[in-house]
Amino acid sequence: MTAPTKPTGPTRNTSGEDLHTPVIAWFDEHARDLPWRHPDAGAWAVMVSEFMLQQTPVNRVLPVYEQWLARWPRPADLAKDAPGEAVRAWGRLGYPRRALRLHGAAVAITERHGGDVPTDHAQLLALPGIGEYTAAAVASFAYGQRHPVLDTNVRRVFARAVSGVQYPPNATTAAERRLARALLPEGESTAARWAAASMELGALVCTAKNESCHRCPIAAQCAWRLAGKPEHDGPPRKGQTYAGTDRQVRGKLLAVLREAHVPVPQSALDRVWEEPVQRGRALDGLVADGLVEPLPGGLYRLPLT
């Protein structure tokens, strides 16, 4: 079995310049009108959107995002509230630890940066809960800086268009980072536009399934299409399951606590899932993650500190 081509840099027939102009032109015409893209959105709005959009589709994020910004229009507004309120407002977006991380980032922004999301990439990266991707995305989308922004959609576009493989590796590699840097336009504003455009292309056209090559602005030079769209020949892609998992149980337990504004007895939590071992494991996990606070007398609540 032949190993898939590894994304080490632009192929002989594809350069960054060949991709930038058509992809950005496509984006100018087809980009979705999303509130965090509006000129007056501000860096905090961009940061909130980036936290929420991780592993969650836009249509689920939009209502929660709008409610969040209406309640907490600045980091200091969120920092003043208990972290449990962030978990409550997160609703059913999933992966609720993101809410705690966003609250932690808001506290740090308030304490270290006077309530303003820092413009410096290193300072963004130093905030709690901010990783490589989020720091680059905020610096690029909020402040128009030149950084490689590698989310799942961008990685898939680069894997296909440049490296000639159907899917990128399961986890971001050093080779992908080198490729992303090699493809970055020199100008800051163009680089920021390229980051947004390549991400949108992956979200709307070069999707994981049922890609729409007939609508793709770079189909004529896509290495994967020109090779006849060879099937994925690497490690199995990670699938996501939910029904019957600890994630589902955790979600049910949190739903009870989100609805309650007073501590909840163990008996109320016991009713959400019949199997006691899995239920107990899920609850212990929520406590360990800081999403649930146990109290004397077998009571539980969302965290206050």
Image (spheres, rainbow, N blue to C red):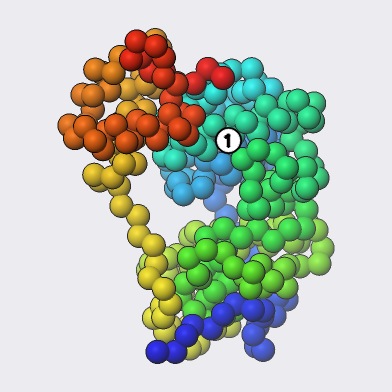
> Residue 267 placed where, x, y %?
24, 17
Residue 113 against residue 232 in the figure, above or below:
above
Is residue 223 or residue 276 the one in the foreground? 276
Neighbor class of circle 1 (other Cα within 10 Å; few <14, some 14-19, many 20+) is: some
Q: Can residue 267 be seen in this view?
A: yes
Residue 292, above or below 176: above
Q: Where is residue 17 in the image (x, y as percent from the top left)?
A: 73, 76
* Quadrant (top left/top right/bottom left/bottom right) for the C terminus: top right
What is the secondary structure assignment of the residue under circle 1? helix
Q: Which amino acid type is marked by label 1?
A: Arg
- Residue located 17% across and 32% down the image: 274
Question: Which of the 4 quarters of the picture holds residue 68?
Answer: top right
Residue 219 seen in render: no
The foreground one among 198 and 29 is: 198
Q: Which residue lies furthest to the left in this view?
A: 274
The residue pinned by badge 1 equals: 101
Residue 74 at x, y percent in the picture:
67, 26
How many numbered callouts?
1
Residue drawn at the location 43% of the way across and 25% of the way down: 292
Which percent across, then down, holds residue 146?
A: 77, 58
Quadrant of the rendering where the N terminus is positioned: bottom left
- Residue at 57% x, 55% y is 31
Figure quadrant of residue 266: top left
Q: Which image quadrant for residue 9? A: bottom right
Identify the residue shown where x is 24% and y is 36%: 277
Q: Nearer the viewer, residue 264 or 29?
A: 264
The image shows residue 64, relative to residue 222, as above or below, that is above
